[in-house]
Amino acid sequence: MSSSEGTQQKVDTTRLQAIARGYTEAAVLYTALDISLFSHVHNGASSEAALVKLTGLRPLDIDRLVTCCLSMGLLLWDAGKLVNSRDVDTFLVEGSTKFAGPWMTFTRQDVPGWFDMTAKMRSPRASLLGMYDDLTVESAKKYHEATASIGFGAARRFVKLVDLNGRRHLLDLGGGSGAYSITAVKKFQGLKATVLDLPPVVVATQDYIKQENVQERVTTIGADFTKGDFPSPVDVVVMASNLPIYGSDVIADVVQRAFKALEPGGEMHLIGEMLDDDKCGPLDAAMWGMNELICGSLGRAHTRSDCVKYFEKAGFVDIEISDFVPNVLVRCTGWRP
Ligand SMILES: C[S@@+](CC[C@H](N)C(=O)[O-])C[C@H]1O[C@@H](n2cnc3c(N)ncnc32)[C@H](O)[C@@H]1O
């Protein structure tokens, strides 16, 4: 034993136990959302008795749930009254424009699959598009109710960070609800955008385009971005939040075809959950890579330097990589000379 090991604290099982029971926190959050717990608290239900009355549940179960939420820091005590923590009050109250409940339960249907991971690894079944093979208009609408509840916030962050003044045409690969395109054309005069996404998805995209009244400036193309040429010329390409769905060859090829579609001087922004180069985190990026096993695709988590390499190989210059949403999303940007 080295002298440094000798001075280390005695090892115990607490960290491992917390990991082994990590699923319990997700389940409590889902249940609190099911019964609108945080909305009730926001609207003034500041005691367990008030919550029992509003939900019709047993006092025993409300006590159990409130106790868990307090211990998780989702609820707090304020002078003897229950209140929501700041993030809960901002994002988990129904009816608020910032309500992100649909995103929080976005992967709930995958829970049984996560607990069947060993079997899935032993007899893997995967296709290039994974869960996207079976999309219908109805499932795409539901899916994008969730992505929109978080995507428009990310898009507002994007247009604050990236100056697209003078740009004329943005191509939004896998644009989903159209959050980035819609937000960008609203901010930058003279910019038009095309959302390219799978055929059932663009039906949902059109609902958001109409809702935001930007039909004149945002159009859609129903297509699979893993093949074919992209509309050209464009001067901006954005690809956001679909990186781990695909493996390296596919992403490198998409970046290459995006490069070809760009005018000289054009820019591409790849925004995704990227791993640090030593693969030691962020945990969220690693888990999105694993999510692709559960969803049956061939995707994986990519590191920051993987993404820089895809850009270099395509011919991009002045490549920059930076935190977009720290610990969640990274942005890789390059210019076509
Ligand atoms: C998590 S959503 C992100 C949507 C949007 N970019 C945003 O950030 O809000 C991923 C999107 O990628 C799209 N997508 C995945 N594979 C695709 C493919 N092969 N071709 C076109 N779109 C694809 C999905 O349909 C979905 O709309």
Image (cartoon, helix red, strand yellow):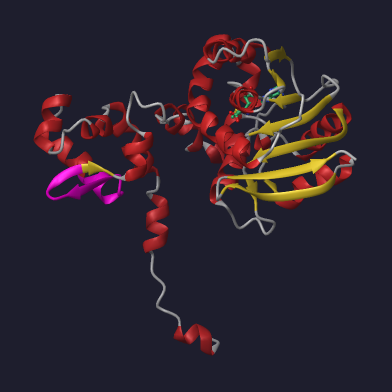
Q: Quadrant of the C terminus?
A: top right
Q: Name the one closer to the observer, 111 or 144.
A: 144
Is residue 58 something one can see in this rendering?
no
Q: Residue furthest bottom?
A: 3
Counting from the top left corner in percent of width and height, residue 139 is at: 53, 15
146 displayed left or right of 124:
left
Q: Is residue 66 above or below residue 224?
A: below
Q: Name the one closer to the observer, 218 or 66.
A: 218
* Residue in the image at 46% along x and 27% along y: 109
Q: Which quadrant contains ligand 1?
A: top right
* Residue in the image at 75% along x and 45% along y: 307
Q: Name the one closer to the observer, 203 or 3.
A: 203
Inspect the magenta stretch and tell me whether residue 74 lies in it. yes
Is residue 79 something one can see in this rendering?
yes
Counting from the top left corner in percent of width and height, residue 49 is at: 9, 34
Q: Is residue 163 above or below residue 210?
A: below
**Figure disc tally:** 0
Inspect the magenta stretch and tell me whether residue 94 lies in it. no
Q: Name the one closer to the observer, 10 or 226.
A: 226
112 displayed left or right of 270:
left
Q: Is residue 261 above or below residue 14?
A: above
The residues colored magenta run 67-82
Counting from the top left corner in percent of width and height, residue 334 is at: 79, 43
